[in-house]
Amino acid sequence: MKKTLFLAIVVLGALLVPGRLSSKVVPETIFTDNMVLQRNATVQIWGKATPLSRVSVKPSWTTETYWAPVGKNGKWGAQFPTPDAGGPYTITLSDGEELTLKNILIGEVWVCSGQSNMEMPMGAQWSKDGKVGVDGFQEEIASLDKVPGLRLINLNKVTSNVPLESASVTNGGWTVCTEETVTPFSATAYFFGKYLYENLGIPVGLIETCWGGTIAEAWTSKESLSNMHDFDKSLEALEDLPERVKNWEADHQRAIDQWKVTVNGADPSWKNGKTNWATKDVYDASWGDIENPCKMQTLLGEDFDGAVWFRKAVDIPRSWADKDLTLSLSTIDDEDWTFFNGVQVGNIDGYDTDRVYTVPGSKVKAGKAVIAVRVIDYQGTGGIWGEPDKMFLQVKGDDSTRIPLAGTWKYKVSVPKEEVPELPVRLDPGPNFPTLLYNAMINPIVGYGIRGAIWYQGESNAERAAQYRELLPLMIRDWRKAWGYSFPFYIVQIANFMDAQTGPEESSWAFLRDAQKETAQQLENAGLAVTIDIGEAEDIHPRNKYDVGKRLALQALAKTYGKKVVYDGPMYHTYKIKGNEIEILFHSAEGLTTSDGKAPEGFWIAGSDHIFHKAEAKISGKKVIVSSPEVEFPVAVRYGWANNPYCNLVNGAGLPASPFRTDDWQQVRGGTK
């Protein structure tokens, strides 16, 4: 029986109250006309009625009547078996006054959750070209009469600091597929459900509960998160969160300001807002070398947070003297203080903001000049890490004078990670706070009979990929514990995005994909839909959601429903080093080939120096053999290891190989940005 809660609840969002509350017996908001109940299962229904009465439950597919006592608090719940797929049926509820739920189907029910790529609706609009709808949208709208057994329910975006009992739902609950209901519904979920419906020939019900831009810990219960101490401070704040968020912005800024005072106080280079590490006569020959742009964790360790100085000397031409200059440093994470010959020219706190500063002409003299940048990384990755061509110095307004700044800089740590205090907890009342979405958008549907879940999320956790290796399986086990059984859970591996790869990358997105793959391989009843071939460089929300839904459905058809279909692309299994070559063996590699008929691309190979070089690759049966003339003694291989790699390995079914690595070198952990 679904657990009921007697806690006072605080809802940070509007709850929709169904229009049918006039009856005495009221089922919960997820039990409505048009719903799909899980076939061949013992399912539950619950709600409210007259206290201390009893509710009769009469499904039309049986002559049995099921009874549920009503507690003093007016809550009741009943269990009953469902038949094989079919319908439509009715369920009549009564505590003296009858309420009949109509047009009910029995079939397969799936929860569809995640962030914006799961939320992205069928009728999504793009501002760049004015297109309405994901790929295939118009064709789907024109053929909705072909999916009468596909039913939808969408939960509203709601947050709560305590577990809620009632789900806030759109359209009054479950709906049939019409243009009005499909257009705002998840495109990935719709195509997944439609593919199942077409291949199983039975009704499919989809429960959409997702929120764009959200983090996985927001979708995980407090009870489970308490086993992972990364979130202890946030969990402690949950109880009085509603009162504290009233003034959260001012309080948080005061806490951050005090935190910065503490960090600055620990910095020998920084006294009373001034520094002696920025002038051009500072002796920096003993400092280390770093190739900027570069995330500082590459040299200082994945968990580094603290203050680091970067310095670069340039020669100022005589023609530049006394002229205003533009100093562009691309993106810096998190906060920078930038100096030109000891004079501060800029300061920005923002991990995703390009730095473009003006050097006043009065400070510009011919000869040697030093650009010095003090960077504090508060959490996660940090450093001068943007695009190389956005790092330059030039006469203001004259691009022809540009001096590139990408390349070798000197660096020195001024505040090591051991001296950086824990960042104050952000009490933003938005969705990105541990457990708020679980409380409001998962807990209310726990107990509704489901076959399984599909999950498309990860972009918002990419800067903490090592943490995600623990967090994602924890969340999955958390949901399964709540429902009481180990239901199937299928994960979308995040797609390729951002600038196309031009060289080896230490990509947080690649590490996140690896964490998703590892979770799918290590947990029972799990699977991975690879999408490394259908992303878009300039849009984090690819329009091709049909293939995402189909690949999820192939996982379910094979693993949940026992259909003989190819459901995985080539999956890395093991490797052997043979001389100057590495031989890689794959699972699910029947008909191993490339998507474009060319030689395999996307492989990178490294020796014991951990420096990767582009590899030459050739297919041999279910193996790929890689080598590079620049690596005499190879020890490791990576494939598709970048934000947006070009990789073309597929099997005979045309499904892409998942990115992988054979090494266990650096990965990104860090805290919440």
Image (cartoon, rainbow, N blue to C red):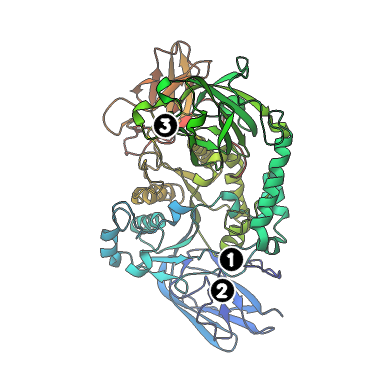
Picture mark count: 3
Relative image position of residue 88 (x, y in whole percent): 40, 74
Relative image position of residue 99 (x, y in whole percent): 51, 84
Q: CA distance from mark 2 to mark 3?
A: 46 Å
Q: Are marks 2 and 1 in contact (CB under 8 Å)?
A: yes
What residue is disc 3 on? 640
Q: CA distance from mark 2 to mark 1?
A: 9 Å
Q: Secondary structure at mark 1?
A: helix
Left or right of 159 in this view: 186: left
Reply above or below: 319 against 246: above
Label 1 neighbour load within 10 Å: few <14, some 14-19, many 20+: many
Q: Secondary structure at mark 3?
A: loop
Tell me the residue at 62%/82% (across/down): 49
Q: Mark on residue 28?
A: 2
* Figure quadrant of the C terminus: top right
Q: Say which label, 2 or 3, has the lower sequence index.
A: 2
Relative image position of residue 76 (x, y in whole percent): 64, 76
Question: Does any portion of residue 638 appear in the rendered image?
Answer: yes
* Amino acid under disc 2: Glu
Instruction: Name the quadrant containing residue 74.
Output: bottom right
Left or right of 213 in this view: 498: left
What residue is disc 1 on? 444
* Amino acid under disc 3: Gly
In this rendering, the label closer to the viewer, 2 or 3? 3
